[in-house]
Structure formats: structure tokens, C-alpha cells
Image (cartoon, rainbow, N blue to C red):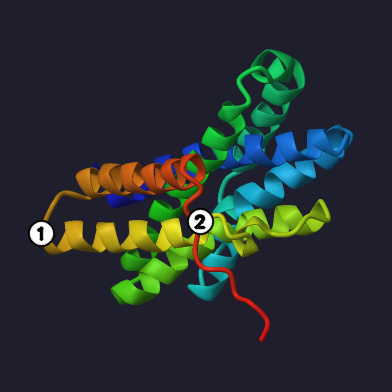
Amino acid sequence: MNQDIIISVIEMLGTFAFAISGIRHAAAKQFDWFGGYVCGIAVAIGGGTIRDVMLSTTPFWMTTPIYMICTAVALITVAFFGRWMEPLKNAWFVFDTFGLALFTIAGIQKSLAFDQPFWVAIIMGCITGSAGGVIRDVLLNNEPVIFHKEIYAMACVLGGLVYWLCILTELPAEISAILTFAIICLIRFLAVRYHISLPILRDV
């Protein structure tokens, strides 16, 4: 598959997954539909926008309205089917994790397409995956999740290192993306399931 097509597909899936996550958090705060849409779009395009600005290119969502439409579909999904999804409480966490993994991969691939070194690509992947969540939490007046002891942004970094190793071993981009996606999701699931966290920074 063409590299641009792969990036677009991953960004689309990531947009839907992150939008649902953002809209769900807005629903928990009893925001109206417009507020939910704003939170959904903020988390869906926030990280990618920062990445594209740093890469000196037009933000991805400004090239086509499909990302806005995708977020609208996510809003309708939560609004009309949220009560049936609510018993599956872990589904929201899964959507957030999928979005994190997908956008991390998209950030890495796009940075490499712009001839950035791999260490920059890993940072861009982390920004793409986690910055939207920071914007969402600020809008909702919550402490950003990346500052919690729960492993979040570090999963992006470790996933980026896996992608780098895949490229070094000359694996196809599609296989590298699948393996990276699986590793990021696995790290997040295991970290939450077994309460694995980084050491807490303590005041002296």
C-alpha cells in the first residue's frame, strides 16, 4: 500500500477512536452536544495539528472535511448508542488506547515521510498520540492523564522504539504498524490491569 494511504487510514481510525473517547468524557461532565463535539474534535485533531505545525505542513484536518464528519459520527454514536455501550465500561478505555496507538503510528510515519531522523519521529509520535488528550483534559478542567502515574505517553515512546526496530530489520511498513499497535495496546492494558507505573516524583 502507498505510504500516504496507510497514514490516512490510520489517522481516520485514530480520529474516530479518540473522538469517542473525548465525547464520552464530555458526556460524563454533562456537556451539551456542541460541547461534546468540541471535546471530541480537540482530542481527535489536537496532537496531529501540533505535529503538522512543527513539521511546517498544512494540518491534516484542513485538507479534507472527512475528519470533522468522522467526529460528528462519533458524537451520534455516543449520543444514541452510549447507554448500550455504558455497561461495557472498559470499552471507553479500549477506544482511548486504540486512538493512542493509531495516532502514535501516524505521527511516526508522517515524520519519517518528511525525512526527519528517527528520534524526532518517536517524539512526534508521542506528541500526536498524547497531546490531544492533554487539550481535552484542560477543556474539562481535569488533571492531564499523562501527568498521572499511569503509563500513557511512555507507551508511545516504547511503541516508537518497536517501530524503529522493525524498520531496522527491514519489515514492511504494514507489519511494523501492526506490531507497534499491538505493543502500545499491550503496554497500556497490562499497566492498568496490574497497576504498573513509573516512580512518583517526590518533593525533598
How many other residues sit within 10 Å of disc 1, few (<14), some (14-19) or many (≥20)? few
The location of residue 48, given as percent across then percent down, is 55, 58
Residue at figure coordinates x 46%, y 48% from the top left = 191
Q: Does 118 appear above or below 82? A: below
Identify the residue position indicated by label 1 in the image.
Answer: 169
Residue 78: quarter of image: top right
Residue at figure coordinates x 53%, y 74% from the top left = 54
Which quadrant is home to the N terminus?
A: top left
Q: Between disc 2 and disc 1, whose residue precedes? A: 2
Residue 155, labelled with which disc? none
Identify the residue position indicated by label 2 in the image.
Answer: 151
Callout 1 amino acid:
Thr
Q: Of all residues shown, which one is farthest toward the top?
A: 84
Residue 37: quarter of image: top right
Q: Is residue 46 visible?
A: no
Residue at figure coordinates x 26%, y 45% from the top left = 179
Secondary structure of residue under mark 1: loop
Q: Does 182 appear above or below 43? A: above
The location of residue 83, given as percent across then percent down, is 73, 16
